[in-house]
Amino acid sequence: MTFKDIMNIVKEIPSTTGRKDCEAVFKLSQTVPNDGIVIETGTGNGRTTAVLALATMNRFITIITIDNYSESKRYSKNRGVWSLDYAKNIFNKFKIDKNIVIVTGNANDYLKNYSGRIDMIYLDDCHLYPVVKEEIILSKQIMMNGVIAGHDYNDWRSDGIAVSKAVNEEFINSKVNIDNTVWSVYYNKETK
């Protein structure tokens, strides 16, 4: 499925993730091996999750997406739109629900207890500096080899300055790739 095909499908999902950032996520999804594992923090309405799932649907990728929906009222323009039920309905509608595992809870708590393989982790939930920094530290602890990435690098609309600061501090000796407001690092624990 091409990126254009995917955007024609997901454009109806209200989201703060625009077309250019969806394309960056699409490109990152192509680095995930067949039978890979992707963890996403910050499900929201499910647009990024849907892009990941549609881009990898014929490769048996499992996407674990985590959100506690504590910011629902802040992000929702219409009552009930930014919700777990909305995301579940979208995944079902697009027939991608079988590749997605939804976890309702705190992402950092989940990452602290995660012990499986990860091929890509995409951080896009709380954008407060200490939370982003902890998520990156936890990601580096559990990731052996793959992509650590996230949203809102240098994006003034969503406290992206805090995101940028945490990324730059934690990856001071790594090449950080920036594609619009999506940041990514190809991480190998053995070389760090």
Image: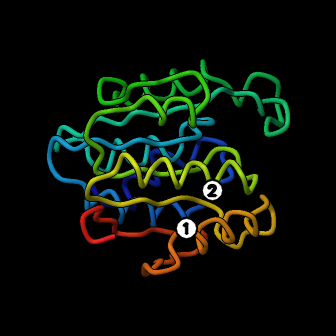
Instruction: Name the residue tied to disc 1.
Output: 170
Horizontal side, residue 127 vs residue 176: left or right: right
Identify the residue at horizontal 60%, vertical 75% (top origin).
168
Identify the residue at horizontal 22%, vertical 44% (top origin).
36
- Counting from the top left corner in percent of width and height, residue 18 is at 61, 60
- In terms of depth relative to the viewer, which is nearer, 134 or 57? 134
Q: Residue 42 lies in what quarter of the image?
A: top right
- Counting from the top left corner in percent of width and height, residue 27 is at 35, 66
Q: Is residue 39 above or below residue 82?
A: below
Instruction: Name the residue tied to disc 2.
Output: 133
- Counting from the top left corner in percent of width and height, residue 166 is at 65, 65
Count of marks overlaid on the render: 2
Amino acid, disc 2: Lys
Q: Is residue 174 above or below residue 163?
A: below
- Mark 2 in CB contact with mark 1 (< 8 angstroms): yes
Identify the residue at horizontal 47%, vertical 42% (top origin).
40
Counting residues from the start of the chain, the first of labels 2 and 1 encountered is: 2
